[in-house]
Image (cartoon, grey):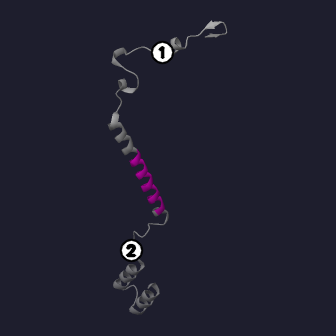
């Protein structure tokens, strides 16, 4: 094949970078052996861990934005505790309990 007055040999150019198997290295990563199934399993586990981490991060952000998301005491428990301490009398306790329920 001629281009611009010079002869170009496609096979010669394709093999110009070929160095053979120097020091036991073949084509590809790690001498042609690669990681095989072990690498695929590790990569799969890595991406599952990333996705699970993102899900937990989003859940944590949503719960913290709501102000605890029910992690604290209920209003009725607080009312019972205040009545037990004597902060409110029986009449006020019954009225507030009726309002809550």
- The picture quadrant where one finds residue 5 is top right
Magenta region, residue range: 47-62
Please, what secondary structure does the residue beneath circle 2 have?
A: loop
For label 2, the residue is: 73
For label 1, the residue is: 17
* Label 1 or label 2, whichever comes before in sequence order: 1
Q: Residue furthest bottom?
A: 91
- The structure residue drawn at horizontal position 51% and vertical position 16%, both measured from the top left corner, is 14
Q: Determine whether, in the image, residue 2 is placed left or right of residue 33.
A: right
Q: Is residue 60 above or below residue 74?
A: above
Label 2: how many residues lie within 10 Å, few (<14), some (14-19) or many (20+)? few
Q: Main secondary structure of the magenta part?
A: helix
Q: Determine whether, in the image, residue 16 is placed left or right of residue 37.
A: right
**Callout 1–callout 2 Cβ contact below 8 Å:** no
Label 1: how many residues lie within 10 Å, few (<14), some (14-19) or many (20+)? few
Q: Is residue 35 above or below residue 58?
A: above
**Nearer mark to the viewer, of 1 and 2:** 1
Residue 49 lies in the magenta stretch: yes
- The structure residue drawn at horizontal position 67% and vertical position 9%, both measured from the top left corner, is 4
Where residue 41 appears, as percent x and y from the top left, is: 34, 41
Mark 1 and mark 2: span between their CA atoms? 72 Å
Where residue 88 appears, as percent x and y from the top left, is: 40, 87
- The structure residue drawn at horizontal position 41% and vertical position 25%, both measured from the top left corner, is 28
Q: Quadrant of the C terminus?
A: bottom left
């Amino acid at each position: 094949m001629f281009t611009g007055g010079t002869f170009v040999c496609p096979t010669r150019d394709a093999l110009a970078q070929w160095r053979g198997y120097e020091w036991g290295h073949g084509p590809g990563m790690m001498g042609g052996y690669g990681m095989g199934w072990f690498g695929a399993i590790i990569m799969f586990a890595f991406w599952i861990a990333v996705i699970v981490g993102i899900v937990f991060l989003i859940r944590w952000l949503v719960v913290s934005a709501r102000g605890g998301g029910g992690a604290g005491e209920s209003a009725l428990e607080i009312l019972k505790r205040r009545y037990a301490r004597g902060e409110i009398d029986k009449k006020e306790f019954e009225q507030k309990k009726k309002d809550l329920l």
